[in-house]
């Protein structure tokens, strides 16, 4: 495995247009969508120590999302 190759294979899911707002909200929390999805899955599966990630205030990401359109 090369140093730039991810440790996990990509997975495909269908989300719709919320994916773009999710990206803006994730960036407002200084993280990435993939990281948040992994946290949600760990929480849902009741993994030890897993917690729901914090959510940003709507104003912190909604403004950025509108400016990008």
Image (cartoon, helix red, strand yellow):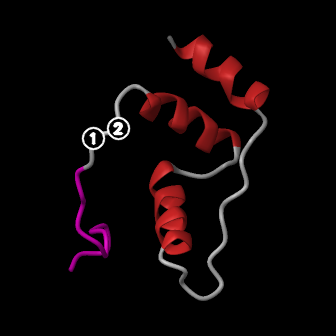
User: CA–CA distance between discs 2 and 1?
Assistant: 4 Å
Residue 57's disc is: none
| Residue 60 painted magenta | no
Depth check: 27 or 53 in front? 53
Q: Report helix, strand or loop for mark 1.
A: loop
Is residue 6 located in the magenta-colored stretch of the structure?
yes
Q: Nearer the viewer, residue 29 or 53?
A: 53
Residue 38 position (above or below residue 21): below
User: In terms of secondary structure, what is the magenta stretch mainly?
Assistant: loop
Residue under the image location 43 percent in, 34 percent down: 19
Image location (x, y in percent) of residue 42: 50, 74
Structural crowding at the residue carrying mark 2, measured as other residues with C-alpha within 10 Å and reported as few (<14), some (14–19) or many (≥20):
few
Residue that numbered label 2 is attached to:
15
Q: Which residue is mark 1?
A: 14
Q: Residue at x 24, y 60 (%)?
A: 10
| Image height of 30 relative to 10, above or below | above
Q: Is residue 65 left or right of residue 6?
A: right
Point out residue 52 in the picture as x, y percentages from the top left corner.
Answer: 65, 64
Q: Which residues are magenta?
A: 1-12
Q: Which residue is situated farthest in the bottom direction here?
A: 48
The image shows residue 35 at horizontal and vertical percentages of 51, 60
User: x and y percent of residue 18 in the render?
Assistant: 46, 30
How many marks the image carries: the answer is 2
Q: Quadrant of the N terminus?
A: bottom left
Q: Please tell me whether mark 2 sits on a helix, a strand or a loop.
A: loop
Q: CB atoms at circles 2 and 1 under 8 Å apart? A: yes
Residue at figure coordinates x 54%, y 16% from the top left: 68
Q: Residues within 10 Å of mark 1 (few under 14, many from 20)?
A: few
Q: In the shown orientation, is residue 26 left or right of residue 55?
A: left
| Residue depicted at 47% across the width and 58% down the height | 37
């Amino acid at each position: 495995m090369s140093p730039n190759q991810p440790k996990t294979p990509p997975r495909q899911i269908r989300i719709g247009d919320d994916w773009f707002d999710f990206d803006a909200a994730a960036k407002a929390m200084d993280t990435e969508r993939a990281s948040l999805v992994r946290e949600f899955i760990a929480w849902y599966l009741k993994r030890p120590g897993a917690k729901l990630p914090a959510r940003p205030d709507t104003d912190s990401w909604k403004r950025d999302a509108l400016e990008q359109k």
